[in-house]
Amino acid sequence: MGHVQDRWYRKEVDPSGKVRRVKTTLHGVGQRYKVRYVDPDGVERSRTFPDRCKAEAEGYLVEVEASKREGKYVNVHAGKISFKAHAENWLKGQSPDRATREALRSRLDSRILPFFATRSVNAITATTVREWLGQLDDAHLSQNYRTVLFTIVSSVLDAAVEERLIHRNPCKSQAIKRPSSPPSNVVVWSRKRVDTIEQRIEGRFQLAVVVGAGCGLRQGEILGLSPDDVDRERMVLQVRRQLRIVDRTLVFALPKGGKTRVVPLSRGVLERITSHIEEHPPTPITLPWQDPAGEPTPVPMLMTGENGRLYSGDLFTKVIWQGAFRSAGIEYRKRADGMHALRHFYASVLLSQGVSIKELAAYLGHNDPGFTLRTYTHLVPSSFERARAAVDGVFSPTDPAPHGLHTA
C-alpha cells in the first residue's frame, strides 16, 4: 500500500515519549507532498504535489491503488515515450510478411511520423489527432488513403493502451470523425470485354486473362503460376505462390495472407492451359523465397515474356495489361479495369450459378466470408422465387401467380 509523505516535516519522539513534528531541511522549498507507491511490476514510483494540496495527493493515491486492483494502472513515466519509438516497436509485431511491413513503414514515414514523431504518446489528445486529420484533408489525399493512415495511427495507440502507456486511445474519442472509405462499387465486366482483352493482350499472356477470369487468381498469383500447380487428376489448380517485389527485388512468396488454397479447374480452362504450354513451353526460373536473402527456389514458369523475361505487377500492368486496352482502342478506367476486374468477373459467374458465399470466399482466398459477402452482396441472385416456391409446397395456391408476385 502506498502512502503520502510530507517532505517539510518529520516525526520525532521526545524523551517523554511524546511524538512531535519537526521541520526538515526541505521546509518551504519545492513540492511538499510526495505520493509513494509500488507499481504492478514491483517498481517504486512517486509523484509530488505543492503545499496546500494534501487532499489532491491523497486522492491521487486512491486512484492509483484502485487502478492497480482493477488492472487499469497506467505508468505515466512510460507514457512519455515518443510516438516514433513506440511505432517502431509496434511495427515489429505486425505481419511477418516483409513486403507488408515495408508498406506500413512507407506510410508511417510519409504521412504519419512527420507529424507525430517527437510527440510523447501520453501527450497525444483528440485535438492533436484532429489537427493531423486536417493536414491530410489539406493535402487532398484520397478518402481510402486517409482511412488507411488513420487506421495505422489508431492501431499504434491501441497498442499503447494495451501496454498501459495511456488510459484510452484518443482516435476513438467521440470528438473525432473517423475517416471511412466510400462504399465499394464493384464493376463487373461483360463477357465481351473479357474476350476483347484476351484477344488483344500479347499472345504469351492470353492465359493470364483466362486464369484470372476462370479461376479468380490475383495478379501476383497469375504471374507466379507454374504447370506444377495444375492437378489434372483432381481437376484443381493449386495456388501456392505469387510473384512480388521486396526491396526492389523479385521474389516468390506465399499468396496473400500466407495461405495456399485449391481452386476448381474447369475443363475449358484446363484445355487453354494445355494449349498455352504447347505453344509457350514453361521457362525455368530461380528466385529467392519470401525476401531477397531467402532460399533460391527453382520454378518452371508459365507467365514469362520473350527469353524468360519476368514482369513485376506494376510493370505488367503498365506495359502488358494497359497495352491490351490501347490495342483494342478501349478507354482504361483506373479503378474498374485493373486486373482485379477478372476476379470480380469470376465471382459474378460463380454466384450466378448458385455457388455459396462460403465456397467463393475459399476459392478467392478470403479469410472472412463476411468480406466476400459485403463485396459481392449486390451480385447474389434474389432468393425470393425459391422462397415462395418452398412455402407454396406447403400452402398450395389456387392462383399460380396472384398479384404479379412472379415478377418480384
Image (tube, grey):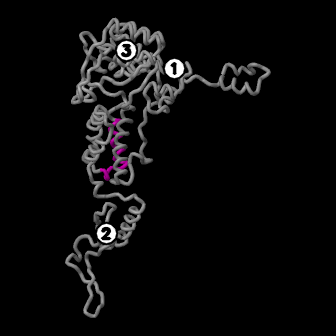
Q: Nearer the viewer, residue 393 or 75?
A: 393
Which amino acid type is marked by label 3?
Answer: Ala
Q: Which residue is mark 3?
A: 208
Give the alpha-carbon distance from disc 2 to disc 3, as whole Å. Answer: 69 Å
What's the residue at 74%, 27% (across, down)?
394
Q: Which mark is residue 350?
A: 1
Q: What number is the disc on residue 35?
A: 2
Mark 3 and mark 1: Cα distance apart in space: 19 Å
Q: Residues within 10 Å of mark 3 (few under 14, many from 20)?
A: many
Is residue 231 in sight in this rendering? yes
Residue 142 percent location from the top left of the image = 37, 30
Determine the residue positioned at 24% across, 81% down. Answer: 23
Q: Say if 131 sits above or below 78 in the image.
A: above
* Residue 126 drawn in magenta: yes
Of labels 2 and 3, earlier in sequence is 2
Residue 330 lies left or right of residue 383; in this view the side is left
261 vs 54, nearest the viewer: 261
Q: Nearer the viewer, mark 2 or mark 3?
A: 3
70 or 255: nearer the eye?
A: 255
Tell which residue pokes out farthest to the right in this image: 398
Q: Are marks 2 and 3 in contact (CB under 8 Å)?
A: no
Q: Quadrant of residue 397?
A: top right
Q: Amino acid at mark 2?
A: Val
Image location (x, y in percent) of residue 51: 30, 73
SS at mark 1? helix
User: For the magenta stretch, what is the residue range?
Assistant: 121-137
Query: N-terminal of the two: label 3 or label 1?
Result: 3
